[in-house]
Structures are given as C-alpha cells and as structure tokens.
Amino acid sequence: MRDPKGKGGWRRMMDRIKKLTLLILLLVVFAAVGQGAELSTHAQIAIITCGPSQVEVFLAFGHSAIRVYDPANGIDHAYNYGVFDFNQPNFYLNYTRGHLLFKLGVDRYPDFVNSYADHNRGVTLQTLDLSQAQKQAVYNYLERNALPENETYRYNYFYNNCSSKVRDVFQEVLGDSIRFDGSHINTDYTIRQLAGLYLKQQPWGRLGIDLCLGLPMDKRATPYEYMFLPDFLESAFDHAFIRQDGNELSIVKVKQPAYLPQSAPILKSRMHPWVAFGGMISITLALSVYDLRREKISRWFDLVLFGVAGLAGSLMIILWTATDHVAAANNFNLLWALPSHLLVVLIYRKDSAMLLRKYFLGVTVLTALVLAGWAILPQQLNVFLIPFVAALFCRSWVVSRLLSSSPVS
C-alpha cells in the first residue's frame, strides 16, 4: 500500500504550485494594467485645440485635448479631460459647492473632430517632436488616467480644467525635459481680464462671473497660468522646448488645421445689460423726482430694488463661505450688495422710520464711495453695474431724506 502521508504531501505541493502560478499571473496582469500597447515608430502625439463657440458661456473659451495616433497599431484616440456627467449623484449640489467632478474621456479622433466641425468650431493640431520613449510614456500615462479608478478629477475653472490638465500631463510625464518659455507673453492680464477676452459677445455671462467671483480673479496671471485657456496653451506649446540627447529642440514639429471654420455672423444679445440697466436707472430717477415732489415714498419700488441687491449679496456670501469656489472669496461687490438689505425690506414700515433713516443714510455714503472709487478698487467691478449701484445711491438718499417726515406708500 502507498503511504497516505506521501499522497497528501503530493497534493499539498501541487496546491502550492497552483497558488504560486496564479500569484505570478496576477502580478503579470497588475504590471500590465494601465500600460498601453507598445507604440510603433510611426506613432504621433499631438495637442488638439478647439475653437470657441458663443452659443453658451461655457463654450466661449474653447477646448483642448491630446491625440495619440499610431496607424501600425490601429490607434487614433482623442484624450479629453472635459467630460462630465449630468447624471452623477447630486450633480447640481456638487456644482454649486465647487465639488464637480470631471473625467478623462477617450474618443475616436475622427469622431471628436467631427463633433466640433458639426458646430463650426475650428480644430488645430500640433504634432510634437518626441522621442519614442517619450511618446510611450505619455501614452501609458493617458491609458492609466483613463482607467475607471483614475479617470475623475476635481474641476476648477482656472487652475484645474480641460486645458491646464493637458499642460500638466506633459509636465508630469516629461519633467525637466520640457520647458515652457513664457517670454512671448507681453501682457500683464489678471485672470478676470483673460476670461473677459472671450466674453465680449457674452455680456450677461461676463456680468454673472464678475458678480459671483471675487478678488482672487484679479490676481496677475503668470505665463504658466495663462494656459488655463486653450488658445494660450496652444501658444505656449508653440514656444516650448524639449530636451533630447543633450539638445533642446522646439517641441512642435508640425502645426496644421484639422478643420477650418466657416465665417459666421457675430451673435449679439437681444437685451444688452446697458439697455436693461439704463432703463432701470431712468425709471429710478423719474420715480425719485416724483417722490420728492409729492413728499411720499414709493415703498414697492424700494422693496424690489433693495430686495434684489440683498439676494445677490446673500448668494455672494454663500459662494464665499459655504462652497469650495476659492475664486468667490473676498468679493468687493458686497460693498453695495449688502445682505442686510433683506432685513431692511422686512422692517420697511413707518414705525421703524428712525432706524431706517440711519440705515439708508449709511447706504447713501457707502454707495457714493463705491461709485467714486470704482476705478481704483482692488477688484475690477463690472461697469454694467454702475447704473444699478447709482440707483441704490439715488433711492437710499431719497428715502433717508423723506422717511422721517413722509408716509410710506
């Protein structure tokens, strides 16, 4: 008879061999995860720059992506860091709080270009002069980023967006081998001014941005920070260098259009802010003269005017203190959009006349100072708001003058 111990030992040894084999296979698989295919010598890496659209505010700044093209391996992908999902949990709450997650999407390059051509948005390609090892490293990095566990990132309008992420890919992968030469930037724009360059056809959009975002927007941008905008990212790569074999070369080897947009009419807002606020200040002045002549206050108008200002100020406070929107901090619009206006609206009665008179006298002085110092404030306030602030000054002066002796109607 055979020794049962020997037979059991053989089985245990076989089990150990199977487990060891499985472990080796798993290690091989994990080592391969996130590594793209071995690129051929025909492979190309390119920066994709897509032109702006004035249909929506968020399209007005353009877009950036990365192309990996390797005909030998059948690869032609566009890696796009500008994808977000309306169906993600608590989308609107996260958007409001500044917690919005964007992700890296991978599309077929022809489909990507066609989607922009269909909307008549120009597309430019900058093919980069990279070594084979550098191309492979960029491709592997993108493939790892595209994995479900790595694909999302916390979006920030100015410091971590679809354009700056493209810059960061090459900075992280190539390290000191890439050098961005910012000497071609001969302007000294703030972040707010840079954003404003693309919103000339979007006056209401620019007004909304200028209302909600505060002093951090008025920071002077460095040439490196200019690259949060796709056009400036494209220009930065035009003036960037790559180090190979001890030599420093221009990183862009070939630049060519992938789609040339057709000429299109300039979109104009049907109701420009100047028209809307110009009409409002005209009504304010006419009603104020009327109230002074009859020595009686039109309470209904002040409830609307100061109520709107108070609501705007409350929104600014929430964006500043209750969200992660760093750019919403230290908002100088709060000098005129006082949240306390909402409390005053609630007690706007004749039996509170003495308190209200002092309050509106203070608002008169404050709004006068804001208007006088408009051009020298640390934060650049939107000029479209001048008529609105002037209306607050006018009404607060009229109310402070008449409130103590005139009935409220």
Image: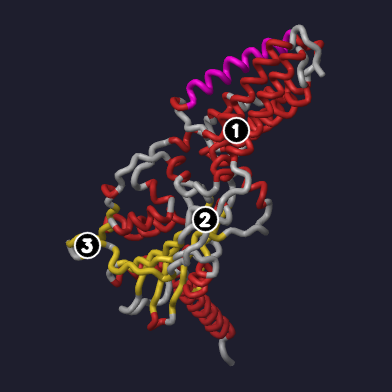
The residue where tag 2 is placed is 266
Q: Looking at the image, which residue is at 69% across and 10% down? A: 401
Image depth: mark 1 or mark 2 in front: 2
Cβ atoms at labels 2 and 3 below 8 Å apart:
no
Q: Give 257 or 316, whichever is nearer the viewer.
A: 257
Q: Amino acid at mark 1?
A: Thr
Give me the disc on residue 321: 1
Q: Residues in magenta?
A: 354-374
Measured in 3D between alpha carbons, the distance from the residue under mark 2 to the one under mark 3, in whole angstroms, is 40 Å
Asked if residue 142 shows in the view, the reply is no
Image depth: mark 3 or mark 1 in front: 3
Q: Amino acid at mark 3?
A: Leu
The x and y percentages for residue 40 are: 34, 79
Q: Amino acid at mark 2?
A: Ile
Which element type, helix, strand or loop, lies under badge 2?
A: loop
Q: Earlier in the sequence, mark 3 or mark 1?
A: 3
The x and y percentages for residue 298 are: 77, 21
Q: Earlier in the sequence, mark 2 or mark 3?
A: 3
Which element type, helix, strand or loop, lies under badge 1?
A: helix
Give me the disc on residue 249: 3
Q: Main secondary structure of the magenta part?
A: helix
Cβ atoms at labels 1 and 2 below 8 Å apart:
no
- Asked if the magenta segment contains residue 144, the reply would be no
Residue 49 appears left or right of 355: left
Tell me the quarter of the image containing the C terminus.
top right
Q: Earlier in the sequence, mark 1 or mark 2?
A: 2
- Asked if the magenta segment contains residue 371, the reply would be yes
Asked if residue 381 shows in the view, the reply is yes
Q: Residue 386 is drawn in which quadrant? A: top right
Q: Looking at the image, which residue is at 49% across and 26% down? A: 374
Measured in 3D between alpha carbons, the distance from the residue under mark 3 to the one under mark 1, in whole angstroms, is 47 Å
Q: Does residue 359 sit above or below 23 in this rendering? A: above
